[in-house]
Image (cartoon, helix red, strand yellow):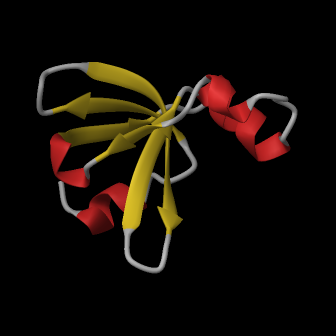
Amino acid sequence: MNYDDVQTYFNRHCRIRLRSGKEIFGVLWEELSDTDKAIYFASYIEHKKRISRLHSELNAFPPLRVSYDEIINIEQIDF
């Protein structure tokens, strides 16, 4: 998938199929720095904790950095 396709699903609970064949469930988001655009993944629950800042140790479960070209399919999961 290209970056624009992946960007459509940022901050939404999704099923993500990776090039390795693994399927993961969670949330992708982007963090920008002066030199880099990075895409991160965390489980739905960990993502909610990060957003609400309820988790006292955010680094206990650091998000995984994902390259958009490793993603072959994304499907949004609605509750």
Quadrant in the rendering for residue 5: bottom left
User: Where in the figure is residue 74, as x and y percent of width and height?
Assistant: 32, 40
Extreme residue toward the top, this view = 22
**Quadrant position of the N terminus in the picture:** bottom left
Extreme residue toward the bottom, this view = 34
User: Where in the figure is residue 3, as x and y percent of width and height?
Assistant: 27, 64
Judge left or right: residue 30 versus residue 17.
right
Vertical order, 20 against 37 (above or below): above
Extreme residue toward the left, this view = 20
User: Where in the figure is residue 77, as x and y percent of width and height?
Assistant: 50, 31
Task: Give the residue drawn at x 38%, y 43%.
Answer: 65
Judge left or right: residue 56 versus residue 18.
right
Is residue 2 visible from the viewing direction of this image?
Answer: yes
Task: Give the residue drawn at x 48%, y 59%.
Answer: 30
Vertical order, 66 against 10 (above or below): above
Is residue 79 visible from the viewing direction of this image?
Answer: no
Task: Give the residue drawn at x 16%, y 51%.
Answer: 69
